[in-house]
Image (tube, helix red, strand yellow):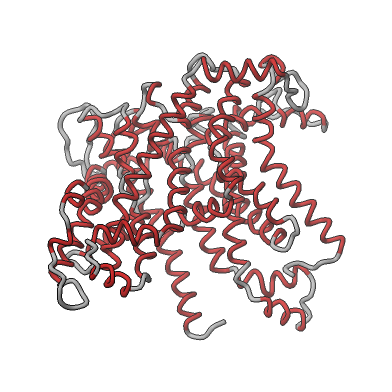
């Protein structure tokens, strides 16, 4: 028992928790309600917006037609997937080599990875932006994806995971004629599956929700990701000032990850906590 | 990548005799497997970071030809520029509000739900903001905080208070953003504290009861708080870094305004680097940011190292 269990303290503790939980959930609730309410009735002085069918059709219709919201979401999906696949394809072999193979330069590479962990993501962005601008790659998928395909965090995570893997299994695989690369893919990747799942959730959430980098490299609405699209919707485009439609857009952009979170909470929490360590 | 895929690594090593692949073949395989990551690490992280360090001593500016070394001029400009001082003050204010609130609230929630029957339900509710798109939810907060007709002001008026122009009043805007920041961080801190709480052995609480600390606060001060110390240090460092890096809410809701009252360090960096293209100056800002974050991380590492050593030597 961390706190005493008298009934009065239990009531107080419930009251505190419920109040906080309402504050946490309220913006989601308000966003959903407003997305279903006619624009003219959202700010009519009543405490909460009152949904109507006509309001719902109007708002979601505007969100999907006045701005290319589906396009934004498709862009976000493609970008997140490309980043994730490349991050894993690059980090798994490297993590395996760092954990299990002795090769010249390994200590230096390990130091490089540890140093890389210290560098905040914003630091390298100026030179990368200049390089992308000079090579005419701004406003492209390449600009959105390229800077993130190396994840020192993934390399470090997988390396830590692989270090404890039994060497006997690897030796047996080698005797069976496995190449080192196929060991990395066919033995280490499945063994690291929990770490891969955690990392994937962290990576997808980070890049789906990222605003900073898309804001830096994208100006063409056709190339915008979901988060940038919402920010753009709020300020410009035909939806500007239309709170109901903006909330409908917010619901659509938030729904995939939130439903994903509700379905697999444990994985989600582990992934996000691991990722920010 | 193509390189690593095209070479059949097994052909490098005739592994007939012996348990192990010959050392030379293993070395070759290790190099080939780590080459893509090494090149990208240099090209996308370490190289650019070093470049930024050098650029911070130049007057580099995108679109203008010619770069000159100007020594520490960017740094002295940073220290003397009233605009930057303002954004430092705003950031400090934001951090000063967000850090204690998000940590205290996260700790309170963790302690209260650790033994609650509805723990899973509460955990879901408090973690929801961490999983959601901050940009989308920031626009919802903006509508809730609407200067005259939003939910918050309707509520205030029902309670007899006068309306507050939360995000459009220079006196309140940074606090409104801080409230959104706290809302987003509480759940994350709660999870870290919950993990910490689960490692505290039940016997300590039993011992505390024998010593007479059988009531909530006493037990908390005698057992929970000292046992959570390493987690608290970690959460504090994480929260400071996260609060110091506030960007999304500013970029979406206020763009640094009204009257510069919400211009924070990272937003200033973004504007200088990618709006005004003052590459040298923006680099100096980012180098300072890096030094600050690294310093905090090192402090955190030192503390947890000392703690680990203390544990290894038989403490607890």
Pick the quarter of the image with the C terminus of chain B: bottom right
Q: Residue at x 68, y 17 (%)?
A: A55
Name the side, left or right, on which B236 lies relative to B22: right
Q: Viewed as shown, does residue B21 lie left or right of A149?
A: left
Q: Quadrant of the rendered structure where residue B309 is?
A: bottom left
Residue B104 in percent (x, y) is at 64, 56
The residue lying furthest to the right in this view is: A7
Looking at this view, is B106 or B58 the one in front? B106
Examine the rendering and report whether any part of residue B182 can be seen. no
Above-or-below relation of A119 to B212:
above
Residue A32, position in %: x, y? 66, 29
Give residue B162's quadrant in the image. Answer: top right
Above or below for A182 versus B172: below
Residue found 77% across the figure and 27% down from its top: A47
Q: Is residue B145 left or right of residue A172?
A: right
Count of labels shown? Answer: 0
Residue B294: % across, % down: 38, 57
Q: Please provide percent x and percent y for residue B227.
A: 61, 72
Is residue B301 or residue A144 the one in the foreground?
Answer: A144
């Amino acid at each position: 028992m961390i706190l005493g269990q008298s009934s009065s303290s239990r009531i107080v503790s419930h009251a505190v928790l419920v109040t906080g939980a309402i504050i946490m959930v309220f913006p989601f609730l308000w966003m959903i309600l407003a997305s279903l309410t006619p624009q003219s009735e959202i700010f009519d002085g009543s405490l909460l917006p009152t949904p109507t069918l006509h309001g719902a059709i109007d708002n979601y219709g505007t969100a999907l037609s006045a701005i290319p919201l589906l396009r934004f979401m498709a862009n976000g999906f493609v970008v997140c997937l490309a980043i994730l696949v490349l991050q894993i394809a690059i980090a798994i072999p490297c993590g395996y080599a760092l954990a299990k193979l002795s090769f010249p330069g390994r200590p230096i590479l390990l130091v490089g990875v540890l140093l890389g962990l210290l560098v905040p993501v914003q630091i390298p962005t100026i030179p990368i932006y200049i390089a992308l601008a000079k090579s005419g790659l701004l406003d492209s998928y390449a600009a959105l994806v390229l800077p993130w395909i190396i994840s020192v965090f993934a390399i470090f995570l997988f390396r830590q995971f692989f270090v404890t893997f039994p060497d006997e299994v690897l030796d047996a695989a080698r005797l069976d004629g496995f190449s080192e690369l196929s060991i990395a893919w066919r033995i280490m990747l499945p063994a690291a599956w929990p770490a891969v799942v955690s990392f994937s959730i962290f990576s997808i959430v980070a890049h789906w929700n990222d605003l900073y980098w898309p804001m830096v490299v994208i100006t063409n609405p056709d190339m915008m990701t979901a988060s940038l699209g919402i920010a753009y919707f709020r300020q410009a485009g035909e939806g500007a000032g239309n709170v109901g439609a903006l909330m409908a857009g917010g619901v659509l952009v938030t729904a995939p990850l939130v439903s994903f979170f509700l379905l697999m909470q444990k994985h989600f929490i582990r992934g996000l906590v691991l990722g920010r360590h | 990548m193509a390189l690593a895929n095209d070479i059949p690594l097994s052909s490098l090593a005739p592994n007939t005799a012996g348990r192990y692949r010959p050392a030379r073949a293993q070395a070759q395989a290790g190099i080939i497997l780590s080459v893509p990551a090494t090149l990208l690490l240099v090209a996308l992280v370490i190289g650019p970071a070093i470049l930024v360090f050098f650029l911070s001593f130049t007057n580099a500016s995108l679109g203008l030809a010619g770069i000159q070394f100007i020594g520490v001029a960017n740094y002295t400009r940073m220290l003397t520029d009233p605009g930057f001082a303002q954004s430092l003050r705003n950031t400090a204010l934001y951090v000063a509000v967000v850090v204690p609130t998000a940590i205290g609230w996260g700790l309170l929630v963790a302690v209260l739900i650790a033994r609650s029957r509805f723990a899973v339900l509460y955990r879901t509710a408090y973690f929801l903001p961490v999983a959601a798109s901050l940009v989308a939810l920031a626009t919802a907060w903006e509508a809730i905080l609407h200067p005259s007709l939003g939910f918050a002001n309707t509520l205030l008026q029902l309670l007899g208070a006068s309306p507050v122009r939360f995000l459009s009043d220079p006196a309140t805007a940074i606090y409104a953003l801080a409230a959104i920041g706290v809302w987003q961080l509480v759940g994350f801190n709660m999870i870290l504290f919950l993990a910490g709480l689960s490692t505290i052995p039940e016997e300590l609480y039993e011992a505390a009861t024998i010593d007479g600390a059988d009531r909530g606060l006493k037990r908390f001060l005698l057992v929970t708080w000292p046992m959570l110390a390493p987690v608290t240090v970690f959460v504090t460092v994480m929260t400071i870094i996260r609060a110091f890096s506030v960007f999304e809410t500013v970029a979406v809701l206020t763009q640094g305004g009204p009257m510069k009252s919400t211009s924070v360090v990272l937003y200033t960096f973004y504007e200088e680097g990618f709006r005004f293209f003052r590459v040298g100056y923006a680099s100096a800002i980012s180098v300072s940011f890096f030094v600050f974050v690294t310093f905090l991380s090192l402090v955190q590492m030192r503390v947890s190292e000392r703690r680990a050593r203390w544990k290894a030597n038989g403490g607890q």
